[in-house]
Structure formats: C-alpha cells, structure tokens
Amino acid sequence: MKILYLDTSKEDAEIGLYEDQRVLTFVSYYAHRELSTTILKKIEEILKNNKIDFNSLGGILCYKGPGSFTGLRIGISLANALSYGLGIPIEGIMEDEPINEGIDNLIKRQSTKQLTPFYGADPHITLPKK
C-alpha cells in the first residue's frame, strides 16, 4: 500500500511517501507562511518524481498535534479532503507515536474517519483592531 505522510505542525513541513513500511521519499522544506500555497505543489512534485499518481495512493497518515494552529489546520484539512476525494483511509499520529506505528494502524484499520487536530493549547488569535 502506498501511503502519503504529512506533518505541517511547524515551520518546516514534512511530506513522506511510503510503500507499507519502506520509505520511498521523505522531504522537509521551509513552508512557514507559504504552507497553504506550497503543500499541494510539493505533494504533486513528490508523486511525479516517484511515478505515482493520486489514484495510486492507498492511505494517508497525518501528524495531528500538538503544534501550530494554522499549520495543523491546513495539513489536516488537506489530508481529510484527499482521503474523502480519493476514497482512501486516513489515520493520525500524535507527537509520541512513531510513523511506523501509524502506518501499521492505517493498514490494519482501513479507517475512513476524518481527523481533528490536537493543538495542545488554546489558539492565540489576534483581536481585530478597532
């Protein structure tokens, strides 16, 4: 099973492509405030470089927290949309869970639930100026 891994919890986004437990590609890039405009392009680039299309993916594994409010929201929204649109299972991992464990859970459960982020704290939302 080909699995796409996303971690958008910090300034450096991580994207991995796995064949079951075997790493095909793992990329970390500085995304910070450009995450929403770069993440899908990076995923497409990684899939193209590995001669894989979206329809060949068998599941999505996503880091769900704790971490950046906006980063987690973007990454998990994208992961949920891809899971739903492609009709493939999705699984989430937290900070102390290794990727391999998440992949095992994804393969065993074949879950199609949606993920919700775990921020680890209340979000820091700026109040509007009067």
Image (cartoon, rainbow, N blue to C red):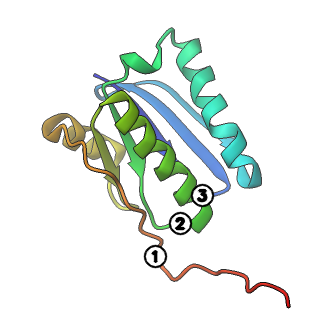
Q: Residue furthest left?
A: 108
**The quarter of the displayed image where residue 60 is located:** top left
Q: Can the viewer see residue 130?
A: yes
- Along the horizontal axis of the image, is 33 left or right of 20? right
Q: Position of residue 68 (x, y in %)?
A: 59, 65
Among the two numbered marks 1 and 3 on one chain, the one whose residue lies closer to the N terminus: 3
* Element carrying mark 1: loop
Q: Are marks 1 and 3 in contact (CB under 8 Å)?
A: no
Q: Are marks 2 and 3 in contact (CB under 8 Å)?
A: yes
- How many marks the image carries: the answer is 3
* Element carrying mark 2: loop
Q: What residue did someone put label 1 on?
A: 120
Q: Can the viewer see residue 30?
A: no
Among the two numbered marks 1 and 2 on one chain, the one whose residue lies closer to the N terminus: 2
Tell me: residue 24, above or below residue 127.
above
Q: What residue did someone put label 3 on?
A: 71
- Along the horizontal axis of the image, is 123 left or right of 60? right
> What amino acid is at disc 2?
Gly
**Point 71% across, 41% down: residue:** 37
* Element carrying mark 3: helix
- Along the horizontal axis of the image, is 111 left or right of 91? left
> What amino acid is at disc 3?
Gly
Tell me: residue 53, above or below residue 114.
above
- Separation of residues labelled 1 and 2 (CA atoms): 7 Å
Q: Residue furthest bottom?
A: 130
> What amino acid is at disc 1?
Gly
**The quarter of the displayed image where residue 46 is located:** top right
Q: Which numbered tag is attached to residue 67? A: 2
